[in-house]
Image: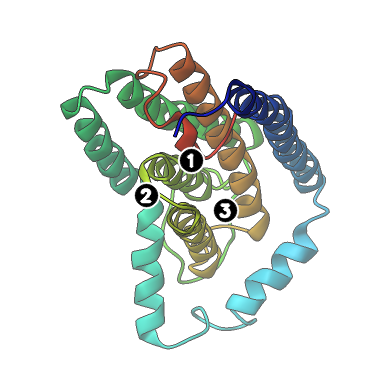
Amino acid sequence: MNQSPQSTQGGIMARIGKREIGLPVTLFCVAALVLGFGLLAGEVMEGDTMGFDTRVARFFRPHGATGPIGPDWLHEMARDVTSLGSMFVLCFLIAAVAGYLLLVRKRGAAALVVGSILGGTVISFGLKLLFNRPRPEIPGGIQVFTASFPSSHAMLSAVTYLTLGALMTRVAVGARLKAYFMGLAVFLTVLVGTSRVYVGVHYATDVLAGWCVGSAWAVLCWVAALRLQRRGKVEPPGLGAAEAGITA
């Protein structure tokens, strides 16, 4: 059945309206995340978060305990979970995704995925050098050699898994599948960050800061990808544009 010109025009206006509303809302979320990081960083540098950090650390590892709460199998499982945010695992995952995108001739999309992770890595280590917060002095923790604030595991897992989750929403059909993929991405991000506090290598505020910056960077990269797509610089504009998780 052919659609009337009025209905077609109404559909176009509705999509334009969503774009006009979606971009400011998205940028507001990014600004809120960056502001949250800034406020948190200020409190951390002044030492006002140590009470909160200590309470969270003692929840997972009571005073005088030689290890975190829970049985030995939980300790080992936490070490396995925290490795999901390691540079090796994330780089392997991104290389696999980029390889697939290159094979299906989506070179622009592959470059954006790799660029988002490389950019996130530079930001993460730049912030670590800037704030240079010492690691928690907790016996029995995993040995690490970089500064504590913000957590690079929390930040880069947010960048990687949220970016990949957003990519999956473009090929998913239906709201349930889209919600499933994004929910899984958020779950993995939260799990990796929480494991860093559990194994004793980060303060809770390190992880919260990493989530703020990582989420903001992932959203910015996704907005850039959608805008480049509409200009035909990532893939033909009509392919999956209606399936995008963020309208920019």
Which residue in the protein does label 3 denote?
135
* Secondary structure under the numbered disc 1 in the rendered image: helix
Name the side, left or right, on which 206 lies relative to 80: right
* Secondary structure under the numbered disc 3 in the rendered image: loop
Q: What residue type is labelled 2?
A: Ser
Nearer mark to the viewer, of 3 and 2: 2
Q: How many marks?
A: 3
Question: What x and y, as percent, mark residue 17?
Answer: 70, 27
Pick whichever of labels 2 and 1 is earlier in the sequence.
Answer: 2
The structure residue drawn at horizontal position 51% and vertical position 78%, both measured from the top left corner, is 68
Q: Residue furthest left?
A: 103
Q: What's the CA distance linking mark 3 and mark 2? A: 17 Å
Name the side, left or right, on which 24 lies relative to 78: right
Pick whichever of labels 3 and 2 is earlier in the sequence.
Answer: 2
Which residue in the protein does label 2 denote?
86
Nearer mark to the viewer, of 3 and 1: 1
Q: What residue type is labelled 1?
A: Val
Colour style of the rendered protein structure: rainbow
Which residue in the protein does label 1 denote?
159
* Secondary structure under the numbered disc 2 in the rendered image: loop
Q: What's the CA distance linking mark 3 and mark 1? A: 23 Å
Q: Nearer the viewer, residue 153 or 3?
A: 3
The structure residue drawn at horizontal position 71% and vertical position 68%, both measured from the top left corner, is 54
Q: In which quarter of the image is residue 7?
A: top right
Q: Nearer the viewer, residue 222 or 54?
A: 222
Q: What's the CA distance linking mark 2 and mark 1? A: 13 Å
Nearer mark to the viewer, of 2 and 1: 1
Q: Which of 2 and 211 is in front in this view?
A: 2
Q: Quadrant of residue 235?
A: top left
Name the side, left or right, on which 148 lies relative to 108: right
